[in-house]
């Protein structure tokens, strides 16, 4: 019991620190908005209602944050805005979207504002210098006219710049909810038997059924997968967002998958957090799928052997050793296809001669800034295998961006993905 109480205190403290950060960002943003209004030199009688309107918008947009703070104090083990009870979902969803879109927009604003302010200061400096030069050569009336039009332009430019992070955040929420991309990948495998040449695999990952991923959305993905007519389907973990009761809607939808050689899965870290491992294994068995927990299945394709191996979630630390022990005693004969939720142990998989490893976990960074081919995202701190096809010697890794989200239900630069893989003999 004392352990539970200290755990509750720790959770409440962590949540309040996070909330304090969000409140600080809101204060910074509100102050910047008020200052911007004042600096624009709006008439006094218009300035006050404008500032009051901004304050009302801020107050309304922060209702979910106030809820989060109150919940952190009185029931820190619950997260209404992320994991409400099934009967509260319809009420929680709009509040949750408001919370995430507004706060993500505010955080992006706070991050971009210093850069924008620097540009604005430089612009003001140049403007003042040009005005001083103009004082000596141009009539005062024309300076006044130019000044007013500049002010109007400035007002519009500042409003547009302040709105951009919120537009990006809103776009990210729409992209996460409605976007779906079928990525077609050809994987060259040396020594691939002729009977396996052209074999197709559909991979889906990180579905995260929950508040932001409904049963009907999973059904849409299943329909797309079936339309691709795969020989085999690989489901690479993180089926749930946070709770065991999300297994039922997930299975209702995913059981509609149709393939020639079967549907195989491995567990992700969120399935472990939800303590749903055994339930998922049972449910997979019930619908004729196979959850591979440090085990394999040999598939005979007209005499050629496809060896499908699945391992439980492997974290970042000592991942090579963990993969080695997970594969201990498993035959690596035939063409090897390894399902491993995280891409971390790819180096070890390549050393062991795995032909193709399929992973997810990274969500492709989920919120990324693409600088050419380089993806700038916090997930890069965890792994270089963010998304797409990688190769070490004769081994390949494909990292799927996933279909769902964790944390904010927002995707920027990393659209939801269903992968259609074709094996090719080289
Ligand atoms: Fe995930």
Image (cartoon, rainbow, N blue to C red):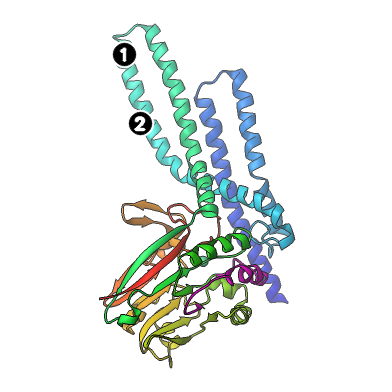
Question: How many angstroms separate mark 2 from mark 1 (CA)?
Answer: 18 Å
Q: Name the residue under label 1.
A: 134
> Residue 322 versus residue 24: which sits nearer the camera?
322
Who's the residue at 49% across and 74% down the image? Answer: 259
Question: Badge 2 local density, few (<14 within 10 Å), some, or many (20+)?
Answer: few
In the picture, measured across the screen, residue 100 lies left or right of residue 388, that is right
Q: Residue 155: x and y, percent?
A: 48, 26
Q: Which residue lies furthest to the bottom in this view?
A: 329
For this rendering, which residue is in front, 202 or 43? Answer: 202
The quadrant of the picture occupied by the C terminus is: bottom left
Please report the residue visible at 55 percent of the width from the left and 36 percent of the height from the top: 31
Q: Where is residue 214 in the image (x, y as percent from the top left)?
A: 62, 60
**Residue 11 falls within the magenta-colored stretch:** no
Residue span colored magenta:
239-263
Q: On the image, which quarter does residue 186 sit in?
A: bottom left
Element at badge 2? Answer: helix
Q: Name the residue under label 2.
A: 122
SS under mark 1: helix
**Ligand 1 closer than 8 Å to label 1 CB:** no
**Residue 310 shown left or right of residue 354 in the figure:** right
Mark 2 beta carbon near ligand 1 (under 8 Å): no
**Image quadrant where residue 399 sits:** bottom left
Q: In which quarter of the image is the N terminus?
A: bottom right
**Can residue 337 be spotted in the picture?**
yes
* First reached walking from the N terminus: tag 2 or tag 1: 2
**Residue 232, position as x, y percentages in the image:** 45, 75
């Amino acid at each position: 019991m004392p352990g539970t109480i200290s755990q509750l205190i720790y959770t409440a403290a962590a949540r309040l620190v996070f909330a304090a950060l969000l409140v600080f960002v809101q204060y910074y943003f509100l102050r910047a908005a008020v200052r911007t209004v004042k600096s624009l030199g709006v008439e006094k009688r218009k300035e006050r209602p404008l500032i009051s309107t901004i304050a009302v918008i801020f107050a309304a947009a922060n209702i979910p944050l106030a809820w989060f703070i109150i919940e952190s104090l009185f029931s820190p083990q619950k997260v209404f805005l992320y994991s409400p009870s099934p009967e509260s979902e319809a009420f929680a969803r709009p509040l949750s979207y408001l919370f995430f879109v507004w706060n993500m927009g505010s955080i992006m604003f706070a991050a971009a504002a210093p850069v924008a302010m620097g540009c604005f200061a430089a612009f003001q400096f140049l403007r003042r210098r040009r005005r001083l030069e103009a004082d000596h050569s141009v009539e005062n009336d024309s300076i006044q006219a130019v000044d007013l039009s500049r002010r109007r332009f400035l007002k519009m430019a500042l409003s547009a710049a302040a709105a951009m992070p919120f537009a990006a955040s809103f776009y990210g929420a729409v992209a996460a909810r409605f976007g779906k991309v079928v990525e077609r990948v050809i994987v060259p495998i040396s020594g691939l038997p002729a009977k396996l040449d052209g074999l197709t695999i559909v991979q889906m990952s990180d579905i995260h059924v929950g508040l932001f991923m409904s049963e009907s959305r999973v059904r849409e993905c299943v329909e797309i997968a079936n339309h691709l007519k795969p020989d085999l389907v690989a489901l690479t973990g993180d089926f749930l967002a946070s709770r065991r009761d999300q297994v039922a809607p997930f299975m209702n939808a995913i059981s509609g998958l149709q393939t020639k050689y079967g549907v195989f899965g491995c567990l992700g870290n969120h399935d472990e957090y939800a303590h749903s491992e055994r339930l998922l294994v049972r449910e997979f068995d019930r619908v004729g799928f196979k959850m591979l927990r440090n085990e394999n299945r040999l598939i005979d394709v007209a005499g050629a052997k496809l060896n499908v191996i699945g391992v439980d979630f492997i974290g970042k630390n000592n991942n090579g050793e963990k993969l080695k022990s997970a594969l201990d005693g498993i035959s690596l004969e035939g063409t090897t296809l390894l399902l491993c939720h995280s891409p971390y142990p790819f180096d070890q998989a390549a050393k062991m001669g795995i032909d193709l490893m399929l992973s997810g976990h990274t969500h492709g960074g989920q919120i990324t800034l693409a600088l050419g081919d380089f993806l700038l995202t916090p997930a890069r701190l965890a792994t270089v295998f963010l998304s797409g096809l990688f190769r070490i010697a004769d081994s390949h890794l494909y990292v799927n961006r996933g279909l769902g989200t964790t944390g904010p239900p927002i995707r920027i630069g990393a659209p939801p993905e269903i992968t259609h893989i074709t094996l090719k003999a080289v």
